[in-house]
Image: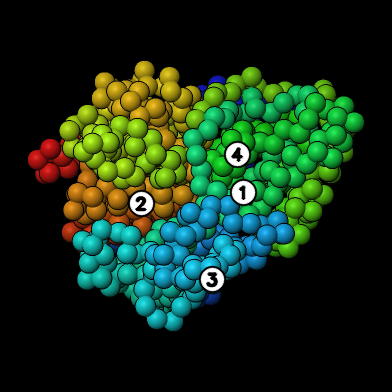
């Protein structure tokens, strides 16, 4: 078992040794068994989209097979494979959002789901032209939900939320004919276009990728965030703790893992149920300790301060502490391996979504109509399982750090209001942020997002890049597993201002924020789009004019491919710390890393060295500043 990848994260190494003694198999064992990666897959030049194949193209030009059986070139195959990753990613985000819209549609006063943020509901109602006079919030919510659901499959027009982009950006999309129409339609169309015998022109496939990804960022993901805030509350700044040390030896530990807040919100309520808390005490535990993993962990920490057990790469380690009574999962980013691993311990591994039944799991279907009862049933089972814990197998690393989380756009603006001059300025805008950027106190802003990936040391790229940027007066906003890396590293504390350059430190002190702002889960990257677009609009500019970039240092999922593509299509240069499987086509690489800039004013940059990546981003930001004359 190679531990090299974990050197950066000292705490995991000890646990892995223990896991080995317990007979646990982990991702590192499987990685070792995989040996060398398939060179064709790694370059994106294998195709199996029809039964004439699979076909693979020789990576050496002029030598070996240069075309698939149908005549598809490496350029076509690479573009199609990339496109299908965009589809996978966009579909995951969008289906997630659709579920939230359905939940909103059943919201009622007596039920489990109620409208929590009436103000945000009213704002959206105004934007979408929904009558609010003398109407119950739930009633308005039902109409909003229906409109949102229509965004997935409406027959005509383009997506509603595009109007939140700067006008210049909207024009670019219109001129390029990449305005997304309906979310599902874009995904279906791109799957169609990449069927055998359809699109073979790589550039046009990339255009379709942009349109589909925009259907995610400015459609599915944004709707997901917007409606989640309305239903479950707009996140506000709050304290929490992060890393495996949040697992408590004397408590019933339950981990919630996956993505959907409709599920995790109910888990939070169930874990607070007095009857179940009393039962936990009866069982000899001090209480119930709910902890989060991956994006669902982000959702519940943003809204409730639930502690973060870890990020993607630590899901197995959390079970290997031997102190986890239950792992409750819904959809996305859940290792199928958890079922087998849970069997090594007393842990109950419970899958709940009909979309993600997991082999070897205990399946308890989550139904929105009986949401709380179902979650209570699962929590009860976990509490009763406390007695089965094998004390000999318990090892909880001491590592944990405190963090301040909950920076929705609304919360960021509230903080910015603290430095607004009440005589001369208006409240409730992003102007203070753009002012400090224009003054040069902050050089710019970077969004750091994405996953963990065994191709790179766990969390090292995230943390290295974050530290480099804040040291150089660049404010960082972050989501997903990148955000959890920052929380674990103690970068989301007020004290982290000491790691910043003078300008950013000053801003942190005045505004009362940490230098790295947790903006939520992966769908909440829409919050980053929102804030960037507000600054651009406030300055009369396009996103691509601003000294901002995005980076996914350790990405791994198809969702990350969709995210990267919509961020670039929104005019923001996007750096990837893991090179995507496209290098089998120089032409496609050139499209992504060069030609896209002519079209949308932004491009991808592949850079695996985190220090160099940070340097390039800073250079990029300074070049944007020069262009603006600031
Ligand atoms: S679509 Fe073409 S390249 Fe792909 S598997 Fe079929 S024949 Fe081969
Ligand atoms: S950041 Fe990546 S690994 Fe983490 S939850 Fe999101 S998609 Fe999954």
Q: Residues within 10 Å of mark 4 (few under 14, many from 20)?
A: many
Please give the residue where the numbered disc 2 appears in the rendered image.
529
Choose between 623 and 543: the one closer to the eye.
543
Please give the residue where the numbered disc 3 appears in the rendered image.
143
**Ligand 2 has an atom within 8 Å of the beta carbon of the residue at disc 4:** no
Q: Quadrant of the N terminus?
A: top right
**Label 3 – label 2 distance at C-alpha:** 25 Å
Classify mark 1: helix, strand or loop: loop
Q: Nearer the viewer, mark 3 or mark 1?
A: 3
**Label 4 – label 1 distance at C-alpha:** 17 Å
Classify mark 4: helix, strand or loop: helix
Residue under the point 53% across and 68% down: 134
**Label 2 – label 4 distance at C-alpha:** 24 Å
Q: Circles 2 and 4: CB distance less than 8 Å?
A: no
Which mark identifies residue 258?
1
Residue under the point 69% across and 23% down: 396
Which mark identifies residue 304?
4
């Amino acid at each position: 078992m190679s531990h090299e990848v974990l050197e950066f994260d000292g705490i995991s190494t000890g646990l892995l040794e223990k896991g080995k003694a317990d007979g646990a198999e982990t991702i590192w064992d499987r990685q070792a068994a995989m040996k060398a990666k398939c060179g064709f897959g790694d370059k994106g030049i294998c195709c199996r989209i029809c039964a004439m194949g699979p076909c693979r193209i020789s990576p050496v030009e002029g030598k070996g097979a240069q075309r698939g059986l149908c005549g598809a070139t490496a350029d076509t195959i690479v573009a199609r494979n990339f496109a299908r990753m965009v589809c996978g990613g966009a579909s995951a985000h969008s289906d997630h959002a659709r579920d939230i819209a359905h939940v909103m549609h059943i919201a009622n006063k007596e039920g489990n789901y109620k409208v929590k943020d009436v103000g945000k509901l009213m704002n959206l109602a105004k934007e979408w032209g929904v009558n609010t006079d003398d109407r119950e919030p739930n009633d308005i919510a039902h109409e909003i939900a229906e409109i949102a659901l229509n965004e997935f499959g409406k027959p005509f027009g383009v997506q509603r939320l595009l109007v939140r982009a700067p006008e210049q950006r909207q024009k670019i999309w219109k001129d390029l004919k990449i305005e997304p129409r309906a979310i599902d339609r874009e995904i279906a169309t791109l799957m169609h276009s990449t069927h055998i015998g359809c699109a073979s022109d790589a550039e046009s496939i990339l255009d379709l990728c942009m349109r589909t990804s925009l259907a995610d960022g400015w459609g599915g993901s944004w709707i997901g965030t917007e409606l989640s805030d309305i239903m479950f509350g707009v996140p506000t700044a709050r304290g929490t703790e992060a890393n495996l040390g949040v697992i408590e030896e004397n408590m019933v530990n339950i981990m919630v893992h996956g993505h959907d807040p409709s599920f995790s919100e109910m888990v939070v309520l169930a874990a607070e149920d007095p009857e179940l808390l009393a039962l936990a005490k009866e069982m000899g535990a001090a209480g119930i300790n709910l902890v989060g993993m991956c994006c669902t962990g982000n959702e519940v920490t943003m809204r409730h301060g639930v502690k973060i057990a870890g990020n993607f790469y630590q899901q197995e380690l959390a079970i290997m502490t031997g102190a986890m009574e239950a792992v409750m999962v819904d959809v996305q980013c859940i290792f199928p391996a958890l079922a087998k691993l849970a069997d090594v311990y007393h842990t109950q591994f419970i899958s709940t979504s009909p979309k993600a039944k997991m082999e070897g799991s205990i399946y308890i279907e989550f139904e929105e109509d009986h949401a709380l009862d179902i979650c209570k049933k699962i929590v009860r089972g976990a509490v009763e399982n406390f007695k089965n814990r094998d004390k000999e197998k318990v090892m909880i690393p001491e590592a944990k750090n405190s963090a301040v989380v909950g920076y929705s756009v609304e919360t960021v603006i509230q903080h910015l209001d603290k430095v607004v001059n009440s005589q001369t300025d208006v409240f409730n805008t992003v102007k203070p942020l753009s002012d400090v950027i224009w003054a040069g106190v902050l050089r710019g802003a970077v969004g750091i997002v994405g996953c963990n990936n065994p191709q790179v040391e766990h969390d090292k790229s995230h943390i290295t890049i974050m530290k480099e940027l804040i040291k150089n007066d660049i404010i960082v906003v972050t989501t997903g597993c990148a955000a959890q890396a920052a929380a674990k590293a103690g970068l989301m504390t007020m004290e982290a201002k000491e790691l910043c350059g003078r300008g950013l430190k000053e801003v942190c002190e005045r505004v009362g924020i940490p230098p790295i702002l947790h903006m939520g889960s992966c769908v909440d990257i829409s919050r980053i789009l929102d804030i960037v677009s507000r600054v651009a609009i406030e300055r009369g500019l396009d996103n691509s004019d601003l000294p901002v970039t995005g980076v996914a240092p350790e990405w791994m999922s198809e969702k990350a491919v969709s995210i990267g593509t919509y961020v670039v299509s929104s005019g923001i240069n996007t750096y990837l710390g893991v090179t995507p499987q496209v290098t089998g086509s120089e032409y496609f690489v050139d499209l992504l890393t060069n030609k896209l800039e002519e079209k949308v004013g932004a491009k991808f940059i592949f850079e695996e060295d985190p220090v160099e990546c940070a340097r390039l981003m800073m250079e990029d930001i300074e070049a944007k500043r020069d262009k603006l004359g600031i």
